Image (cartoon, rainbow, N blue to C red):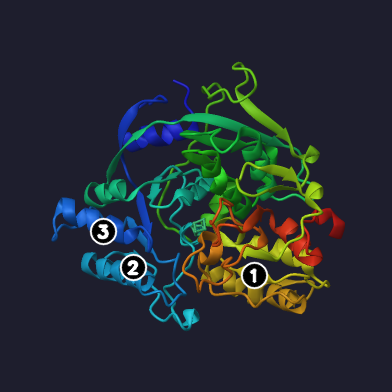
Amino acid sequence: MAMTMVEKILAKASGKSTVTPGENIWINVDVLMTHDVCGPGTIGIFKKEFGEKAQVWDREKIVLIPDHYIFTTDKRANRNVDILRDFAQEQNIKYFYDITDRSNFKANPDYKGVCHVALAQEGHTRPGEVLFGTDSHTCNAGAFGQFATGIGNTDAAFILGTGKLLVKVPATMRFVLNGEMPDYLLAKDLILQIIGDISVSGATYRTMEFAGETVKQMTMEERMTLCNMVIEAGGKNGVIAADETTFKYLQGRTDKTFESFHTDENATFYSVGASRAEHYRSYDVTKLEPVVAKPHSPDNKELARNCQDVKIDRVYIGSCTGGKTSDFLHAAKLIKGHQVKVPTYLVPATQKVYEDLFSLKHDGKTLSEIFLDAGCIEPAAPSCAACLGGPKDTFGRLNEPEICVSTTNRNFPGRMGNKQAQVYLASPYTAAASALTGYVTDPREFM
Ligand code: SF4
């Protein structure tokens, strides 16, 4: 029977030869990730249901990543990390990316930063596998041809004890992107365009599979940006078939063997077009323009050039969506030689990204030099920082009703702090261009 890539992954994980959308199946889990926000709750449920002395199902398949509320004096936030540490020690968890010295994160060789980028950089995102995480942007890992999705604490506790989960097989919506990517567009523009087209509920409980020549040409980081935001359309997961680019990225990051799956040409897709007969939505990327998501929803799409009268108070470049090395490289290329007009906050997703800012060069200068010369605020320690608001002392948090252009993924009221603040979601190019003018700006003005 013809199947999609995700159906094949789930069939393998359930020990069946075929599965169909809507079917409820028990699957074996390859990786479970939790972080400082949901980890303590997950651990509490695990102990309540399985017993104080219960052992996790597999200490090598669990990844604990403190990343959300790290560089804060908030005692409850700090305590959450302590709970993860105690549990990691008690269970001898193999992958615990600890932070012990918050005053100097560079002195913490184990500390990574934002979970979704860290999972990829540390080789936990392998094609053909099943990854669950207690975080909605776990879908990020679909970029590697993995079935990856967010779950709640109760499901995660069940996995801790059993290594299994009951899931309903999602139908697949296919998005085919063709054409050579214009040099003013980034993957963020494409996913904001798609979410704007299908709405924040347009893919509810469905797989969003991305294919086509444009996707094949993308780096892994750009593919991650596409998959990262499928949850903003309600998607269960996003997925891209693994290829040479994927295998090259994984080289040296994992020694585990994996199997990659591909969608059969005659597989059945969920109809996504205007007519039920249309089985996939296709885009010619050469015809697209830089877009933003206006407040207060990721599907509130508008062309960046139509927002040029929107005066802004700050720019934020960071998060699992827009705080990867290439995101900063793109921003730096645009900013180089200019001065920012508004406070510009830089939050590298992980330690590795942070290091890249100080070692990677563009036109003879490190990215960090380019940003500092332009008047940006010094790059912060890697973490989720203000993407999720966080405690009042969080770096970059919108504590006032300000207007911000951000490379993050959500702009619901209060998401980055103040409930009256307005967040425009944008690509790193658009964010950088906006920093240079103090208004929402189409990056083509600087290209
Ligand atoms: S960076 Fe933002 S979206 Fe990503 S995991 Fe952290 S809080 Fe969530």
Which amino acid, mark 2?
A: Asn
SS label for mark 2:
helix
In the image, 16: left or right of 282?
left
Q: Which mark is residue 80?
A: 2
SS label for mark 3:
helix
Among the two numbered marks 3 and 1 on one chain, the one whose residue lies closer to the N terminus = 3
At 48% across and 79% down in the image, what residue appears?
Answer: 105
Give how far across and how far down residue 441 sits, in percent. 79, 56
Q: Which residue is mark 3?
A: 43
Q: CA distance from mark 1 to mark 2?
A: 26 Å
Mark 2 residue crowding within 10 angstroms, few (<14) / some (14–19) / many (20+): many
Among the two numbered marks 3 and 2 on one chain, the one whose residue lies closer to the N terminus = 3
User: Would you identify the image quadrant in which residue 70 lies?
Assistant: bottom left
Among the two numbered marks 1 and 2 on one chain, the one whose residue lies closer to the N terminus = 2
SS label for mark 1:
strand
The answer to whether residue 384 of the structure is visible from this angle is yes
Give how far across and how far down residue 356 sits, in percent. 62, 71
Give how far across and how far down residue 212 sits, in percent. 66, 36
Q: Which residue is mark 1?
A: 345
Which amino acid, mark 3?
A: Ile
The quadrant the C terminus occupies is bottom right
